[in-house]
Image (cartoon, rainbow, N blue to C red):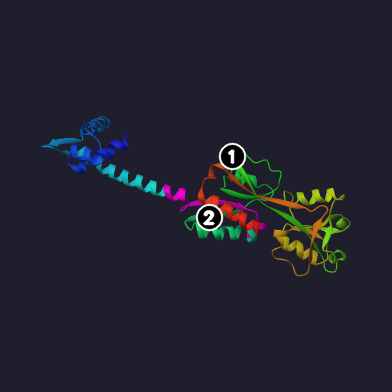
Amino acid sequence: MLDVRRLNLLRVVVSSGSITAAARNLGYTPSAVSQQIALLEKEAGLPLLERIGRGVRPTTAGRLLAGHAGVINQTLAEAETQLADLRAGRTGRLTIRYISSIGPTVVAPALARLRAEHPGIQIDLKLVDPADPLPAADKDRADLTILVGSDHGSPRGVHLVRLLDDAYRAVLPPGHPLAAQHTVDLAELAGEPWIGSEPPGPCLTPITEACAAAGFSPNFVATSEDYATAQAFVAAGLGVCLIPRLGLGKRHPGVTVRKVHRPEPVRTIYAAVPEVTLAQPALRALLEALKDAAGG
C-alpha cells in the first residue's frame, strides 16, 4: 500500500524541481525528504526520480504517482470541506419518523424553523406505526422518532427526550347535559356509549387506564382510528369520546369539547434519538425546535 503522505511529498519534489527546494517549502531537512522518497520507491518497486545537475526530474513512474498524488490531495481537501460542512450542520440528511396527530402543531413548525436555520439539510420524513414506534428508532435507525408513551423501555443506545404531556379532552354531542360544565369528571362518562378514537397501543392506554382508575370500562359502540371521523360520529349523536388536545386542531363544528379530570388522561410524547447522532448540530437544532413548538 502506497503511503499518501509520501505521495504528496513526491508531488512537491516534482513541482519544486529539487529535493532541497521541496524541503525548504515543507519545512523539512533535505535528508528527511530523501529518506521518505527512498521508502516510497521501495513501496513502488521502481525508481521515481533521476538527478539532473543540482535538481531532479521524475521518471515515468514518478510522473504517474505525482499525478495521482495531486488527485488524491484534491479529493482529501474536498472530503475535509464536506466533513466540516457536516460537522457545522450546513449539509447532511435527517431521517425523521413521527405520529400524525402532532404533525400540524409540532412537527411542521419545527421543520420550518430547521429549514430556515439549516437550509442545506435534506429531510426524510415519514409516518411511524403508532402501535410499535420504537423499531424506527432502533432497527431502522431513524435519526429522530416521535412516539407516545411513558413506559417505553428504550433500546440500548437510544436516548428519549420528553417533549410534552398531551391531555385528553371529552368530546360531547350537541345538547349533551355535561356540555354546560366547564370540566367533566371522567366517572360522569361511565354510562355513556363511547366512540373509540385510538387504535390499540400507547395512545389508547392512557384512556383505558384512566377509566379503570375512575371505576369503569368504556362501552365502545363504534371505533375510529381517525380523530376527524370520531368527532363526526360524536356530532351524529352516536356517543362520546376522548381525543388528545393536539388531535383537536380541526374541531368539528357540531361537538362540544370539555376538560376532563379525576383523573385526567394524558399521553406523553417523546423524541427517540440514537445517542450516536446526538452530536449532529442539525439534529440538536431540530430537538430544540420541537421542544419550543411543543411548549407553545
Locate residue 243, reporting x and y percent.
75, 58
Residue placed under numbered mark 2 in the picture: 123
Image point (86%, 63%), residue name: 178
Q: Is residue 179 left or right of residue 135?
A: right
Q: Is residue 157 above or below residue 236?
A: above
Q: Secondary structure at mark 2?
A: strand
Image point (46%, 48%), residue name: 87
Residue farthest to the right, as pictured: 191
Give the image quarter of residue 187.
bottom right
Q: Quadrant of the N terminus?
A: top left
Q: Is residue 99 left or right of residue 39?
A: right
Q: Are marks 2 and 1 in contact (CB under 8 Å)?
A: no
The answer to whether residue 59 shows anywhere in this view is no
Count of picture labels = 2
**C-alpha distance separating marks 2 and 1:** 22 Å
Question: Mark 1 is on which residue type?
Answer: Gly
Q: Is residue 34 above or below residue 73?
A: above
Q: Is residue 160 left or right of residue 80?
A: right
Q: Quadrant of the C terminus?
A: bottom right
The answer to whether residue 81 shows anywhere in this view is yes
The magenta span reads 83-103
- First along the sequence among labels 2 and 1: 2
- 220 and 48: which is toward the camera: 48
Q: Quick check: is 94 in the magenta stretch?
A: yes
Locate residue 46, reporting x and y percent.
22, 32
Question: Mark 2 is on which residue type?
Answer: Ile
Locate residue 147, reporting x and y percent.
66, 50
Q: Which mark is residue 157?
A: 1
Q: Secondary structure at mark 1?
A: loop
Mark nearer the viewer, 2 or 1: 1
- 12 and 202: which is toward the camera: 12
